[in-house]
Amino acid sequence: MKIGIPRGFLYFKYKYFWETFLKELDCEIVLSPMTNKAILKEGIDNSIDESCLSAKVYMGHVKWLVGKCDYILMPRIDSFGKCDKVCTKFNAMYDIVRNTYEGVELLDYNIDCVKGCTEFKAFMRMGKLLKKSKMQTYRAYKRAKEVNKEKKTKIAEEQEKLVQESDSLKILIVAHPYNIYDKLIGEPIVKYVEKLDVLPIYADVTSTKKTRIKYKELSSSLYWTYNKELIGAIEHYKNKVDGIMFVTAFPCGPDSMVNEICLRRIKNIPMINIVLDELQGEAGLHTRIESFIDIIREKKKVVKK
Amino acid sequence: MEQSERIASFPHMGNYHVVVKALIKRILNMKVMTPPPITKRTIELGAKHSPEAVCVPFKYNLGNYIESLEKGADILFQAGGGCRFGYYGEVQEQILRDLGYEFEFLSFDASAGSSIIQIYKAFKNLNPEITISKFMQSFLLTMKMLKCMDEVEEYIRKNIGFEAQKGSFEKMQKSFLNELEKVKSLREIKEIHRKYKEKFEKIEIVKPDKPIRVGIVGELYVLMEPFSNYFIEKELAAYGMEVHRFITASHLLTKRKKHNERLAKEASKYIKYHIGADGTETVEKSKMLAEEKFDGLIHVKPFGCMPEVNAMPMLQRISSDYKIPVLYFSFDSQTSETGIKTRLEAFHDMLTMKRGEKK
């Protein structure tokens, strides 16, 4: 059986998890390619104008997969707990895809912990849909969890080590993984930052155990889980980095307010808020990043003197 | 500060200030200030100090707060729940503090678990004299007031376009709200309701046999705050159309007993899951209106509203499945009024022509 995975949205968060799970169930995985202009265009053509850039990219990836696999994996997430919600885009993506591309075959799973639909139940149900035995599904789930944890911990530790050892200028990048790791949206920014001899530190790879408690120091009533993780990382890293860069896609709902709170509450550290849209001109972006880095460097020189 | 010297205030939404004011006054035993009516200045102030990409109700609320604070209010109320709305309180409080105002801010977010008991506790802090029975009584009274108001306004919505003498409905509505503001008991509400129902029904209307009926669906704030939707309902009525809308405060608080999952089931052809905040109900109601053979639908939302943008692909499908025209509006702080009028006029002309074709 061929299962398609769109390279967008939650793929960047759950890739090890999904890939292991599906491989353990003997499914063949078809991954859509890195985002390119054609995929973005397809996505824009098939989205409501006011959807966020990330959603448009995702729609493009789904379109690419149509006809190339038996099912397309489509998670639907509502809540991980009472005050742990996600953006409503993740509530609705399944239905949006279904209404946009008629007749598309989707393999969906639903996580809504408030209503008792846990991740475990969701994956067991998925195994059943794929006509696998309960035992095999259970094993695959366990294995996927293990691999995911292993990989995530390893990446987090590597970054932690890098932060301690490196002497170059460090910028904390606060952005959803689906934006910053995307070939077309976020990668050019990271590449440019690296070209300026700056070490990018990713907020999302910080261990979630640490970040999930620390977010409270910045915002008490926040209820978006993914944003909690990101701003928890700010608290974790703020004394170890030279600046913070917020990267968000237009018009991201949660980011529009959470970043505002951060910009207003965090003091004594340089910050820049970059909002990306589908018309992004490179030159303007480069100038902004360059001057941001220049300011930090000059400031450091003055402090040293 | 003495309790009686403090002044409480809250953001506007339609005519609901009448009810909210009565509730706070009754429970807190302090002065309550209805914010100055929304004007261009309100939204300009709000937009100036808000994050750029936030949805427009946030900007209106913030404008209301600033104008209330300027006039001396020092306790502000906010509700919350659903999508971005749940996070309004914290961000708005921060912005107002950064502007240098001094005040107390009370925010009740349903999705963060603000139950009626918690609301009671918060109020008890402000007014130790309140008892739970008085609190519940006031709450009940408020709900009845809302219901009465929503029912009367629904009648107005459906008929104001056909009044024989221009302005008679609005005049009556004003005196109705004035009287409603002063009620003290359930019996009085009942009486006023009965009295005004009769009065409104006596207003002469000239209604064609089968008037053009449009349903208006979408996000709750821009549906209920006429300033934010450029008085779209008034505009529709001026073309002699009968306007139907389901989302009212009392509907949201009481009648929506059906959970979103059940709403989704009713529209299962289009949605399997709850798609966030009011999005699910938008789809379900649109399908219902299409099945009832309405002439057209109008979908309104603030620019970038996540749940309503989610609902749009389904509305497009409903539109083509049931052959029902849908007009989409996105409101922001800088929407041009002329543009809206032109589009409404064209929509009206199209619906009229479509009727003609059928005959």
Image: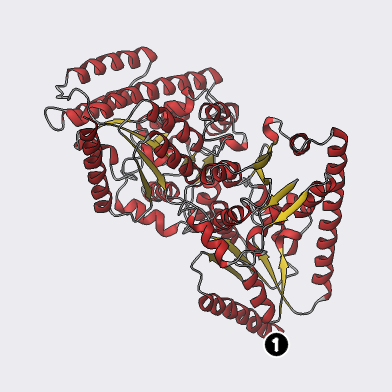
On the rendered image, what quadrant is the C terminus of chain A found in? bottom right
Residue B232 left/right relative to A66: left
Image quarter in which the N terminus of chain A is found: top right
Left-right relation of A275 to B22: right
Which one is in front, B44 or A183? A183
Q: Is residue A211 visible?
A: no
Residue B217 at x, y percent in the picture: 39, 36
- Spot the residue most to the bottom: A305
Q: What residue appears at the point 71 percent right and 31 percent down from the top-left corner?
A: A116
Q: Position of residue A146 (x, y in %)?
A: 87, 49
Q: Is residue A289 left or right of residue A21?
A: left
Amino acid type, mark 1: Lys
> Can you say whether B291 is above or below A23 in the image?
above
In this view, the residue in front, B103 or A232, is A232
What residue do we see at 81% from left, 71% from top? A162
- Name the outermost residue toward the left: B165
Q: Residue at x 20, y 28 (%)?
A: B169
Query: Foreground residue, B130 or A273?
Result: A273
Instruction: Please give the residue where the numbered disc 1 appears in the rendered image.
Output: A305
Disc 1 element: loop
**Vertical side of A262 occupied by A288: above or below:** below
Residue B285 seen by the camera:
yes
Q: Position of residue B45 (x, y in %)?
A: 37, 56
Q: Chain of mark 1?
A: A
